[in-house]
Image: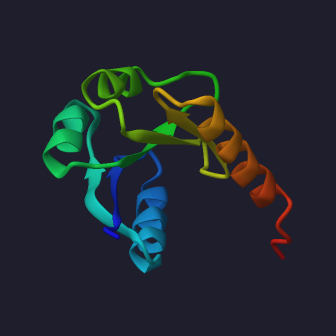
Amino acid sequence: MDDIRCLIADFPKRVLNDILHHVIGQSSGFSVVAKSVESAALCRQVQECAAEVVFIGMDSKVFPDICKEIFSSSKKTIMVGLVDDGRRAAIYIDDVGPSQLLELVRAAKSKSTLDVA
């Protein structure tokens, strides 16, 4: 199976870019296809790199407009919004079915019950 192709947008806090790049690079089944991509080039880079997942910084109260643009041109792209300092995340998936939705809830629930010491 091919690696999941990840694009990392340019975060206001540079350390988040570096942490994501390191974590994804060390994880089996994932690869970084572009890093520190500025908003103006994001839609184009998603297409050119055939990114399957886009990591983007976001304010806790606002769905970034760029996500809507990416969804309109690339429906299968998964958007992962890291909120503020990156300890909270929002995942946006377009055209998700009921069974997929429940799988996502199960995965999130199992993550929330992991003992992370």
The quarter holding residue 35 reads: bottom left
**Residue at left 31%, top 64%?**
32
Residue 66 in picture, x, y percent from top left = 35, 25
Query: Which quadrant is the N terminus positioned in?
Result: bottom left
Residue 111 in picture, x, y percent from top left = 75, 59
**Residue at left 34%, top 30%?**
75
Q: Nearer the viewer, residue 87 or 77?
A: 77
Does 79 sit left or right of 60 as displayed?
Answer: left
Residue 37 in picture, x, y percent from top left = 26, 47
Location of residue 29 with respect to 92 vertically, above or below: below
Question: Total marks drawn?
Answer: 0
Q: Nearer the viewer, residue 40 or 43?
A: 43
**Residue at left 70%, top 40%?**
102
Does 61 sit left or right of 20 as displayed?
Answer: right
Q: Nearer the viewer, residue 78 or 89?
A: 78
Q: How is the image coloured?
A: rainbow
Residue 8 in picture, x, y percent from top left = 36, 52
The quarter holding residue 48 reads: top left
Q: Residue furthest front?
A: 99
Location of residue 94 with respect to 29 vertically, above or below: above
**Residue at left 65%, top 45%?**
104
Query: Which quadrant is the C terminus positioned in?
Result: bottom right
